[in-house]
Image (cartoon, rainbow, N blue to C red):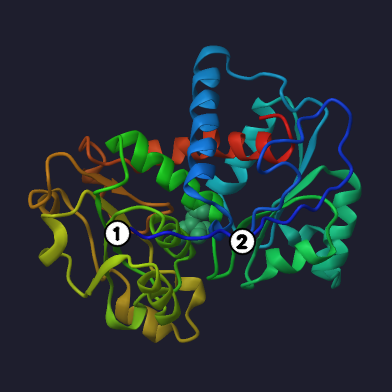
């Protein structure tokens, strides 16, 4: 079975306020990559997320993080990630400094990322960062004394998305080991599949990558997975692997990452999942998508009980509540 040895997480806040738990595995730590997580860590995160789901359905919000402040710093567009972190913090009784449109902040005056981080950590207890450059979150950690949570660094990683994706798989299908996961679409530029594939390497799964030739999973990542003995195959058509698939993870072609619009045009709309497609799929399987979708899944699929993407999106808030509670020391 594939086993990852997670590197030590970074402890970036040595000053523990009185009354907070210091023994949680993520207390005061930045979350930069899924490589920081072991299977035991994931069980822990998912256990807390389930408790959060239960608490929200029973009482809506509660004061676990009362008095804590989160800075939401987004250099790229976001609907779900930004608003689910915001809602997660508010439901835990904390508050948020939202910088969703950096053009209205001093970034537009030319302020550097390190200076912006140094500023926000004076006011906030943790910073959620989305940035177009690979490695931006790791760069922020170098200067930050408070935890940084990577909410997407260019085509690099999107660790909290992978956590909510895996939480969704295990909630929907009640296991991860033994499943066949098929990732479809833009595997080159899609950061969500980069993080999810790495997390899946901790389990005994089969992974199929389906993409146009120019959007294949990066070779280094395939080599990394193979080094961990992940069983994987690569295809350019969905048909050969659809019938065996338990989780069909569909992605958007990442238009904003293409240098040449003509190349984007050559691959846009390369796969479209329709009710007709799902006739060839198992009765008990799920279709996931990190969203936004721009035509990869026809709206007619939404009524199929196998369409799990809206439930997946809802899970994002519970998982981010768990992450915030753990990082800020109250889980
Ligand atoms: C994804 C992202 O930003 O990487 N969206 C998200 O966070 N739910 C996927 C995408 O933009 O295609």
Report whether 156 appears left or right of 314: right
> In which quarter of the view is residue 69 placed?
top right
Front residue of 321/226: it is 226
Which SS class for mark 2? loop
Residue 301: image location, x then y, percent: 22, 45
60 versus 216 height, above or below: above
Residue 41: image location, x then y, percent: 54, 44
Report whether 172 appears left or right of 162: left
Task: Quote the CA–CA distance across marks 1 and 2.
Answer: 36 Å
Going 33% across and 67% down the picture, which residue do you hit? 229
54 versus 32 height, above or below: above
Asked if residue 98 can be seen in this view, the reply is no
Q: Nearer the viewer, mark 1 or mark 2?
A: 2
Which SS class for mark 1? loop
Quadrant for the N terminus in the image: bottom left
Residue position for label 1: 296
Residue 306: image location, x then y, percent: 22, 40
Residue 265: image location, x then y, percent: 35, 79
Label 1 crowd (10 A; few <14 / some 14-19 / many >=20): many
Label 2 crowd (10 A; few <14 / some 14-19 / many >=20): few
Label number found at residue 276: none
Report whether 141 appears left or right of 225: right
Going 48% across and 28% down the picture, which residue do you hit? 50
Going 88% across and 59% down the picture, which residue do you hit? 118
Q: Earlier in the sequence, mark 1 or mark 2?
A: 2
Quadrant for the C terminus in the image: top right
Residue position for label 2: 7
């Amino acid at each position: 079975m594939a086993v990852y040895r997670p590197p030590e997480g970074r402890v970036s806040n040595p000053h523990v306020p009185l009354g907070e738990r210091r023994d949680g595995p993520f207390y005061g730590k930045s979350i930069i990559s899924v490589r920081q997580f072991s299977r035991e860590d994931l069980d822990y995160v998912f256990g807390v997320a389930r408790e959060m789901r239960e608490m929200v359905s029973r009482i809506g919000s509660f004061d676990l993080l009362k008095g804590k402040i989160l800075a939401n710093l987004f250099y790229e567009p976001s609907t779900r990630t930004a608003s689910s972190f915001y809602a997660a913090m508010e439901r835990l009784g904390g508050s948020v400094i939202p910088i969703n449109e950096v053009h209205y902040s001093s970034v537009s005056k030319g302020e550097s990322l390190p200076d912006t981080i140094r500023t926000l950590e004076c006011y906030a207890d943790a910073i959620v960062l989305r940035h177009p450059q690979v490695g931006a979150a790791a760069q922020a950690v170098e200067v930050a004394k408070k935890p940084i949570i990577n909410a997407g660094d260019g085509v690099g990683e999107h660790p909290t998305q992978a956590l909510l994706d895996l939480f969704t798989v295990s909630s929907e299908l009640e296991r991860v080991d033994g499943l066949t996961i098929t990732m479809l679409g833009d595997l080159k530029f899609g950061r969500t599949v980069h993080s999810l594939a790495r997390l899946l390497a901790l389990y005994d799964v089969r992974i199929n990558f389906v993409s146009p030739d120019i959007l294949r999973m990066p070779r280094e990542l395939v080599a990394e997975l193979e080094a961990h003995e992940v069983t994987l195959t690569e295809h350019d058509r969905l048909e050969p692997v659809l019938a065996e698939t338990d989780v069909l993870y569909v992605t958007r072609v990442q238009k904003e990452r293409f240098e040449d619009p003509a190349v984007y045009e050559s691959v846009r709309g390369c796969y479209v999942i329709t009710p007709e497609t799902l006739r060839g799929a198992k009765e008990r399987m799920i279709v996931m998508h990190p969203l936004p979708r721009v035509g990869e899944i026809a709206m007619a699929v939404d009524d199929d009980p196998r369409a799990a993407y809206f439930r997946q999106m809802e899970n994002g808030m519970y998982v981010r509540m768990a992450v915030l509670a753990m990082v800020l020391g109250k889980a």
